[in-house]
Amino acid sequence: MQNSIELQSCVPEGTSLTLNILSQTGEVLSEGIAESQELQIAQPVRLQFVLATKDRSKTPLLDYYRLSFQVDCHHLTR
């Protein structure tokens, strides 16, 4: 199964926006994921978006995100 995340964001200089993938219990499975990166997700997860700034007058903005999953239909049963 292939899956990926796409982010639409505004990240001014001096700020950052990254994504962490957490297990259902909160354990970090993958951290610092960037936009449009392929993910390796095979179980239910939680998403943690990390917005940071070095300048209090600026902040990153996450407009939307989209998860895409491609499933091999040959493995599905009815």
Image (spheres, rainbow, N blue to C red):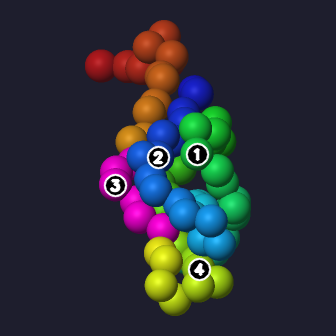
Q: Quadrant of residue 35?
A: top right
- For the residues labelled 2 and 1, say whether their Cβ atoms are less than 8 Å apart: yes
- Residue designated by label 1: 35
Q: Is residue 48 above or below residue 44?
A: below
Asked which secondary structure carries label 4, the reply is: strand
Q: Residue at x 53, y 60 (%)?
A: 11
Q: Residues within 10 Å of mark 3 (few under 14, many from 20)?
A: few
Asked which secondary structure carries label 3, the reply is: strand
Asked which secondary structure carries label 2, the reply is: strand
Specify the segment rendered in magenta.
60-65
- Residue designated by label 3: 63
Q: Residue at x 58, y 85 (%)?
A: 55
Q: Which label lies toward us, 3 or 4?
A: 4
Between marks 1 and 3, how big is the CA–CA gap?
A: 13 Å
Q: Quadrant of residue 53?
A: bottom right
Asked which secondary structure carries label 1, the reply is: loop
Q: In the rendering, at what x and y percent does residue 58 appear?
A: 49, 77
Q: Earlier in the sequence, mark 3 or mark 4?
A: 4
Amino acid type, callout 1: Glu
Amino acid type, callout 4: Thr
Q: Residue at x 51, y 41 (%)?
A: 5
Q: Residues within 10 Å of mark 2 (few under 14, many from 20)?
A: some
The disc placed on residue 7 is 2
Q: Earlier in the sequence, mark 2 or mark 4?
A: 2
Q: Could you tell me if residue 27 is visible in this image?
A: yes
Q: Is residue 10 above or below residue 40?
A: below
Q: Is residue 27 left or right of residue 7?
A: right
Magenta segment: does it hold 61? Answer: yes
Amino acid type, callout 3: Asp
- Residue designated by label 4: 53
